Image (cartoon, rainbow, N blue to C red):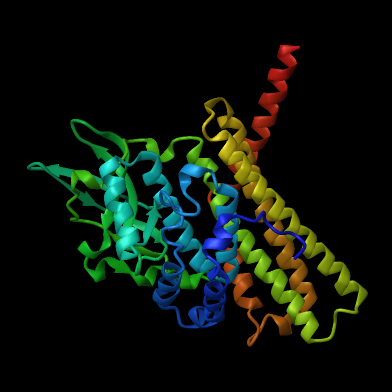
């Protein structure tokens, strides 16, 4: 690829990352055909030091401003397997929320779980009618309700979920981090994940009813989960994983055409040029999004700028993914979308993963940002 992210200490410390990702990619098709909990994949990631990579003192320490490099790592994992990338992004997201809102004691406890026990964290916010509520009785705080789309439900050890709380000291939308080993296995409803793609992510529905919450499991204060600019700004992380899926399709398309001896065809060259231009564009957006995040996230006056750029990045990557899939499908035809080739799975996974919440509202928010900026500038003249 023409595009290369800047060199970093991460590359030196974790020279075995590429080998790990190659192993993950090598079994991705099998994981789609007979979905099982990706235990091996996350054991490999743990052995490569990637579960703790953002903790204090590690190569991509949140405190040191390595967001561009983190996004490139997320992209590379997504390229190996989008389902693994989705679960891993949830782990990173949870650790970031702990970094933002955790007490020193909570950080010590949960960070040690990662470093000493290879704990895997996940963020599960989506719910339907029977969403999470708290029931307070006899000095106990119990949960009633379920979460849906719980990616990695069979292997996540610590789940960050959200729900409505109303006690003498807390009222609103509260985060908590729960230990999954306190739930019986039958609380995971595997029948709920009937999907065209991302099968290996195991994004099942989980019933948390009856779980007794310890005070130390409550993260932050009510309302902080939706706090800006972090809530909308965090979209750049899943966008990076999605770009990895698009990059995988680009690589497999080129490999297919080379294997079939079709790279001399001028029409195929035009399609490849379009694909590779889109991928390069996506990489530039992702790296700039990371730079902006590190520069702006500590400047409250730049919150609107950060959110707008994150929203644009998200929408650009969505369009890139769609364009790359369309051009790839024209390149390879029906044969290339069938086994033994991986492009069928990659298309299904990326198509499904691109369906993130509120895409139209996101675009409207981008337009409003520029309208408001123009209006303010005009009034200041």
Viewer-nearest residue: 364 or 39:
39
Viewer-nearest residue: 221 or 54:
54
Relative placement, left or right, of 140 versus 285 is left
**In the image, residue 106 lies at what x, y percent?**
28, 46
The residue that appears at 59% across and 64% down in the rendered structure is 76
Q: In the rendered view, would you say 305 is above or below 360?
A: above
Relative placement, left or right, of 71 versus 113 is right
The residue that appears at 41% across and 67% down in the rendered structure is 46
Viewer-nearest residue: 321 or 192:
321
The quadrant where residue 269 appears = bottom right
Relative placement, left or right, of 308 versus 161 is right
Q: In the rendered view, would you say 213 is above or below 194?
A: above
Q: In the rendered view, would you say 224 is above or below 300?
A: below
Q: In the rendered view, would you say 217 is above or below 222?
A: below
The residue that appears at 49% across and 79% down in the rendered structure is 31
Viewer-nearest residue: 245 or 11:
11
**In the image, residue 57 lies at what x, y percent?**
43, 50
Image quadrant in which the C terminus is located: top right
Relative placement, left or right, of 312 versus 129 is right
Q: Is residue 181 visible?
A: yes
Q: Is residue 130 visible?
A: no
Image quadrant in which the N terminus is located: bottom right
The residue that appears at 30% across and 62% down in the rendered structure is 116
**In the image, residue 306 lies at what x, y percent?**
59, 36
Q: Report the residue that reaches farthest toward the right.
A: 266
**In the image, residue 10 lies at what x, y percent?**
55, 58
Q: Report the residue that reaches farthest toward the left.
A: 138
């Amino acid at each position: 690829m023409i595009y290369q992210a800047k060199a970093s200490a991460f590359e030196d410390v974790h020279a075995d990352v590429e080998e790990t990702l190659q192993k993950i990619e090598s079994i991705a098709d099998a994981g789609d055909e007979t979905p099982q909990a990706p235990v091996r994949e996350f054991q490999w990631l743990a052995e490569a030091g990637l579960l703790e990579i953002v903790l204090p003192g590690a190569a991509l320490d949140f405190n040191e401003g390595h967001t561009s490099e983190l996004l490139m790592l997320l992209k590379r994992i997504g390229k190996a397997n989008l389902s693994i990338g989705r679960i891993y992004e949830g782990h990173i997201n949870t650790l970031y929320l702990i970094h933002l809102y955790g007490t020193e004691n909570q950080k010590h406890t949960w960070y040690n779980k990662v470093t000493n026990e290879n704990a895997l964290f996940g963020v599960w916010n989506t719910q339907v009618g029977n969403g999470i509520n708290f029931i307070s009785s006899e000095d106990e705080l119990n949960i009633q309700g379920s979460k849906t789309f719980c990616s990695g439900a069979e292997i996540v050890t610590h789940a960050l979920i959200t729900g409505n709380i109303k006690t003498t000291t807390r009222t609103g939308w509260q985060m908590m981090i729960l230990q999954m080993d306190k739930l019986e296995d039958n609380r995971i409803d595997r029948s709920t994940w009937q999907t065209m793609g991302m099968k290996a992510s195991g994004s099942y529905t989980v019933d948390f009813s009856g779980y007794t919450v310890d005070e130390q499991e409550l993260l932050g204060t009510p309302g902080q989960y939706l706090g800006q600019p972090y809530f909308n700004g965090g979209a750049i992380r899943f966008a990076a994983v999605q770009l990895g899926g698009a990059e995988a399709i680009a690589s497999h398309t080129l490999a297919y055409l080379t294997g079939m001896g079709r790279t001399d065809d001028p029409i195929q060259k035009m399609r490849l040029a379009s694909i590779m231009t889109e991928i390069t564009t996506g990489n530039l957006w992702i790296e700039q999004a990371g730079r902006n995040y590190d520069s702006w996230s500590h400047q409250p006056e730049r919150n609107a700028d950060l959110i707008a750029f994150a929203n644009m990045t998200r929408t650009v990557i969505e369009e890139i993914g769609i364009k790359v899939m369309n051009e790839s499908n024209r390149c390879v035809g029906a044969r290339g979308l069938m086994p033994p080739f991986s492009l069928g799975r990659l298309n299904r996974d990326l198509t499904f993963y691109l369906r993130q919440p509120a895409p139209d509202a996101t675009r409207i928010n981008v337009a409003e940002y520029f309208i408001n900026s123009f209006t303010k500038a005009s009034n200041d003249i």
